[in-house]
Every structure is written in C-alpha cells, then in structure tokens.
Amino acid sequence: MKKKSMNSHGRIFKEFICKSGWKISIWSLQTRKISGSHRPVTSSLRSFSVLHSLPVLMAPVSTHYLYKRHLSTASNSQTPNSTTAKTKELSKDTRKRIVDLHQTGKSESTIGKQLGVKKATVGAIIRKWKTYKTTDNLPRSGAPHKMSSRGVKMIMRTVSKDPRTTRGDLVNDLQRAGTTVTKVTISNTLQRQGIKSCSARRVPLLKPVHVQACLKSSREHMDDTAEDWENVMWSDETKVELFGINSTRRVWRKKNTELHPKNTIPTVKHGGGNIMLWGCFSAKGTGRLIRVKDRMNGAMYREILSQNLLPSVRALKMKRGWAFQHNNDPKHTTRATKEWLRKKHLKVLEWPSQSPDLNPRENLWRELKVRVARRQPQNITALEKICMEEWAKIPATVCANLVKTYSNHLTSVIANKGYVTKY
C-alpha cells in the first residue's frame, strides 16, 4: 500500500514537470530503504537549484525526498565565474612543527588533529620537506617573460653604451628586432637587472688635463698620514642664496592641505638675492667666516687673509709647520698674492684645478647651507646673521670627521682614474 502511494507521488511529480514545459530528463524514480523508511531517490536529474526543491513541497510531511544530482560539465558551465577561495597558507612555525612531529614518529592523522590541519596538507608539507629539505614556498613559474633573454642582453648593451637612451628608443629597437613590448616592460626588465632610471648628477666639466692633474695629486698624497691632514687649514668662498637650497622638500600633510604655509616653500624671482662668504676650518673646528660685500679681487683677497687667516690659526692652536690650502682661482694665484704668502712664510699646498671632490670644505658648506635653510631667513640681513650663528654652532667633531676620512677621497679619485667621485 505504501509502495503504491509512493509511486503515485512520483507520477504526479512527472506530470507537473511535463505541464510546466521544462526540458528535464528524469530517468526513473526509485525507492530504497533509508533509516527504516522508504524514500524515493532519483537516479538522474539535470536541473538547477530551484527545481530540486519542488518535490519536497509536493510530498507529504511524513515523506522525505532525496534527489541525487550529478555535477557534470554542464552544471559547471552555468557558473563560469565561480572560483574556489584560496586557503590561507600555514605559517612557517606551523610547518616546522609538522616536520618536528613527523620526525618524532607521529602519523599524519595525529599531527593534523593536534595542530588543527587537514591530513592532506600535513602530507604535502612532509613530502616537500623530504624532497627539498625545506618547507618554504618554492619559486613559482608564473607567466613567462614577454622579453627573451636575447632581448634583455640587447637592451643591456644599449644602455651600457649610452645611459641616456630613452625607453621609447629601446621599444623601437626591440620592435625592429621582432619583439613588441611596452615601456613598462622595459622598466621592469632593467630593474630586474639592477638598473633604474636616475637623474644625472651635475659635476664640473673636466678636461683631460684636469683629470691627469687630479690623479697625479691623489697619488702624491696617498702616503700622507692623518696627522698631516689634521694640520691643514682649509679655505674657500661660497655663495649662499636667500631662497636657494631647501633640503626639506618633502612634508607630511593631509589631503587638500598642499597650500598651507607650513607645507609650501616660498620662492621669489632670481632667488631673492645672495651673499658671498669666505671661511676656513681645520680638524680642530671652524675658523672665521666673513661676508664678501664687494667683487673680490687679488687685493681684497690678500686683505681677507691678513685679517682672518692668521687669527683663525691662532684661535684653533694649529701646530708648527701647518699648511694652507686654497684652490686655483685667479685671485688666489696672482703674482702679488703668491709674493704675500711667501713673505708670511706660509706653506701652501699645491692644488689641481676643477677638483672640488678633493676638498672636504664642500661638505662643510653643505652642512652650513642646510642649517641656514631650516631657519628660513626672509631677507639678506637675516641671512647673513643666521649664517654667522650657524657657522659658530657647527661642532668640532664634524670638522674632525671630514678631515679624518680624507684618505677616502684620494682612494676614490685613484679608483675612478681621476674623474669625479661621490665626494
């Protein structure tokens, strides 16, 4: 009796499906005994999720229908964009514990239960450790590079010969060779080879005679000791602009606050004016610093030395036999200036032209200008006053470190064959 009732329900469901016009193949409705009661089970039902819930509504409350749906390629094509969520990778500590527990003789199931990890995952980690002796992520193949190794060598040769080559030029070169790439691909390829685009440094123009002179001077002084350089009085002139150097160009600010006075750098036409300074220093500290108000000539330069050089030597307590250094500016090398230095019995170091990287004074001028820029002077008078104050504040240790590392200057010049160095 119960079997007839079940068959009648199956017949009713078939008739309902047919009247609805849905093209669904139902091969048969069979019954089997599950947990002591007969429940009809479909052997095959191709449909979507709405359909297989209908028989449950049609069946009596006492009857449960289980419809077994085969997941085939057709069902997968209904949800082409569906993807399986990526499982979170295990931490390195967890992987290490899995290996440690495995070495103690525990099974994969026991390790999985103890650490809350699936048995398959435990087995995969153990197999990787047995094969590669590591549990770290191995390099993945990923998509192949757009550019072949031959193309990489080609652009490397080009940028080595001409560092000013643009990315567009490299793209055109590769296109003529049969490879089409973008500028971004060029940048990424060069970066993987350790090459990146940088602004070219501005350096003094060096003629061959300058290069040879720098190289010769560096070799001659390589045997000088640190004590020799500590007994040198370095001097030079420099120009400080009112709104010139601004080393703090980056600021921390919120969105839409770029025009706040704290986040801007004031500028005026032609730099807002500048002052010329002369100063000297040694390993023991800074000497005198004065402003050169008029155009300097030989006579003015000798006057500056007379009033400021010797007093600075006495103030810094230079040892007997100290040497004086200045560059080959025409004002410094006039016949009258040389005669004045000879009469004062001053030992002058011979110095090659166009060699600022051989003189530590350039680093000290940089230190002064950075300090002055932080105080943001607003006029020439304030600029001069701040320069004097900041010059006096420079610690003697800064000067000592500049002189102490001077041998590095010489070594770099020799290594670079007389050309400009990082100093």
Image: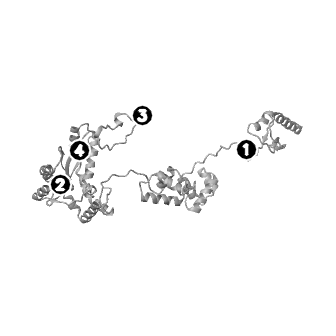
- Between marks 2 and 3, how big is the CA–CA gap? 53 Å
Residue type at mark 3 is: Asn
Left or right side of 314 for 171? right
Image position, residue 397 (x, y; %): 24, 52
> Does the CB distance between marks 2 and 4 fall below 8 Å?
no
Residue type at mark 4 is: Glu
Callout 2 secondary element: loop
Task: From the image, state whether disc 2 or disc 4 is nearer to you.
Answer: 2
Callout 1 secondary element: helix
Q: Quadrant of residue 342?
A: bottom left
Mark 2 or mark 3: whose residue is earlier in sequence: 3
Task: From the image, state whether disc 2 or disc 3 is nearer to you.
Answer: 2
Identified at 55% across, 62% down, the residue is 133
* Residue 209 visible: yes
Task: From the image, state whether disc 1 or disc 2 is nearer to you.
Answer: 2
Determine which residue is flagged by label 3: 256
Mark 2 or mark 4: whose residue is earlier in sequence: 2
> Does the CB distance between marks 4 and 3 fall below 8 Å?
no
> Does the CB distance between marks 1 and 3 fall below 8 Å?
no
